Structure formats: C-alpha cells, structure tokens
Image: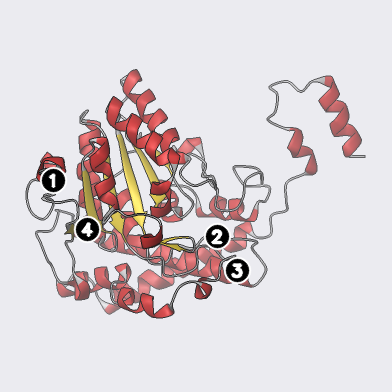
Amino acid sequence: MLDTQTLSYPLERLADPPYAVESTGRLVQVIGEGGAELQSVPHVAPEDLHSMYRWMVRVRVFDTRLVSLQRQGRLGFFVPSTGEEALQIGTAWALQPEDWIFPAYREQGVALYRGYPMERLLCQFLGNREDYLKGRQMPNHYGSPRFRMAVASSPVGTQMPQAVGAAWSAKLRGEPSVTVCYFGDGSTSTGDFHAGMTLAALQQVPVVFFCKNNGWAISLPYEKQTRAAFLSDKAIGYGMPAIRVDGNDVLAVYEASREAMTRAREGEGPTFVELVTQRMGPHSTSDDPSRYRDPALLEPWKAKDPIKRFREYLEGRNLWTEDDEERAWTEADARVTEAIQWAEPIPQPSPASIYDDVYAEMPWHLREQRDESLQ
C-alpha cells in the first residue's frame, strides 16, 4: 500500500504550529471568526498591524467605487476583488523591492501596495493618455517594469511559465530576487500550470505560486473542474512543498508568504500556497453570478469577511478604536475620490500613438502611413 505520508513534502521552515504541514489538506489559520486568536501570532509591530488594516480598507473602497463607476457608464470594465483583501495585502507585505510579480487580473491591492500610483492605475482602467500602457491593454491588465510587475493577460494560466522563466533567469544571474505568481483555481486545470510547475520544481527556481482558490473559475465551480480534494495536493506530484492557508486571515497569509519567500530566497526552490477564499462579487462587471451561483452559498462567507475579522482581532487586543475605524474609511474614500478626480478628465491617447514603440527609429513607409491616417 502506498504510504501517502511520504508524499506530503512538508515545509521544514513551517515546522512549528500552526505552520506545520502534516497534510496538505490542513487549513492554516491564525485569526478565527470573531477575531479569536487560534494559534501563536507572527510578530508584527502594532503600527504595521494598523497599516495592514488601512490598506485592506483602501482596497475595499477602491473596488466599491470602481464598480460604481462602471455601473454609471464612466468605466468600461472592472474586475472586483471584494473578499480577497487579506490575501492581497498579506502576500504583498512579504515582498522585497527586488522581487517580481506576475499577476492574474485581481491583484489591484498588490499593485497599490507595491507603489503603483492609484491615479495611474485608474488611467489604465480608463485607457487614457496618462496610462503607463498608453491605452493599448484591456482594463485590469496593468503592469509596469518600474514596479517589477508584469502586465496581466486574459488567457488562463499563461503567467505561470512566464513567472518560472523570470525566476530561472534570476537564479542563473545570481540575483537575490524572488518571483511570485498569482492565479485562480481554474488555472490549475491548464497545460500552462503543468508546464510551469514541472519546470519550477525541476530547476528549483525561486518562485512562489499563490493559488487563489475562490471556488469559481468564472462560472465553473471547483467540484466540476478537478477531482483533487485540495488544490495544494496537486503540488505533491511535482515534488513541491505546499501549504493550504485561510485566505481571509491576513496574518496567516503573511506568515505563510514570508516563509515561502524565505525558502525561495535561500535557494530552497518553489512553494505552492493555496489561499482559500471566496469571490463575493461577480467575476467581472460583465458577469452575472446569479445565473450560476446560489446567493445562499455566500452567507457563511460573510462571517469570514477578512476586514471584519481583522478589525475584531485588533479591537479585542485594544489596538483599534471606533475613531480609528471611522478615520480609516474616511481617509480611504477621500484618497480614491482624489484619484478619480485627477484621472477621469484626462483625454484618450492620440491616434498617432499607435505608431509609437514599434521601431527604435520609425521607417519611411510607416511614417507615411501615420501622416496619411492623421490627415
């Protein structure tokens, strides 16, 4: 009989509770519902706990306001991330400036924390003249090398082999950077997932795979896309350590992310981190989840709201007050309003810009085409 314990590939660095991986099916938690402290808490200074919470609030407000803009016809398209604030900020908090990010398209919180200016992020959603990508990408496909954030793309899972290639390059160059890759549960059913995981494990590259298991691959539920009991189990076949984390628990996410990145940074290879959460809204503003998802399924998740849970944890330790709460939401709303007022009036890129960035020096025939098209 096959001894499955020999296949669990525990993370040696996560040897002490609650981070030991006795089985990949174990869900790592630090903060329970109601803010209860379930296990020993990673050391984070009180001011950093405050900052974590304010960032989560900012991401929630940003999402809420941009969905509203789209419904008003002021924005063409948006991919909301309500309910996933803890996994965005918890993973981003563990990053170093030299690290590279390969996002899916629901990582606006990671981008903002990374330093991507909110105004410029809005310009990308609007596709206007101040967009770093010059209006050439689909909304929510943001990115910029100055923040070491690759541009997202719509095909499912394509970022995985790209992230592995970047991590392999860093390893060959002897650079200290780690590459992180975000993807949804649906991506684990693709060929690019297999290619990326195989190469990452074989070459032991410094990459961390963040699988956001939010229960749905757009309209396809988890149970209809895989027979795996847990997505973290899929890492076993590649010889890769894995951990399954409560994605609505910001402290558990941060600690697991920090440990996985430490492993990568010290030459111990890749890690697969399954972040268990729920997509509380639609896949995008073009989606109607009521057509395929019973709203009752969301009820248990409302009590697991990552912002509510973290606030109750802070309040229970006398680290947060009602005044702090009011100020956090007011400041976040003012910041988003300021960014919208700056970005929205900016005009679209000039039609002539489609000829830019093709050649270092524009050839005569392209110059003629440009001039004729602008007459």
| Mark closer to the observer (2, 3) | 3
- Left or right, residue 183 beside residue 178: right
Q: Which of marks 2 and 3 is nearer the N terminus?
A: 3
In the image, residue 143 lies at what x, y percent? 51, 43
Residue, disc 1? 4
In front here: 225 or 85? 225
In the image, residue 40 lies at what x, y percent? 9, 59
Label 2 sits on a secondary structure element that is helix
Q: Which of marks 4 and 2 is nearer the N terminus?
A: 4
Residue at screen point 32% across, 55% down: 227
Residue, disc 3? 69
In front here: 33 or 186? 186
Label 4 sits on a secondary structure element that is helix
Residue at screen point 12% across, 66% down: 38
Residue 275 to residue 175: above or below: below
How packed mark 2 is, by other alpha carbons closer than 10 Å (few <14, some 14-19, many 20 or more), is some
Residue 70 to residue 103: above or below: below
The amino acid type found where label 1 is placed reads Thr
Q: Earlier in the sequence, mark 1 or mark 4?
A: 1
- Left or right, residue 280 beside residue 30: right
Q: Measure how far apart labels 1 and 4 are at the Cα level.
A: 30 Å
* Res. 251 mark: 4
Q: Measure how far apart labels 2 and 1 are at the Cα level.
A: 52 Å
How packed mark 1 is, by other alpha carbons closer than 10 Å (few <14, some 14-19, many 20 or more), is few
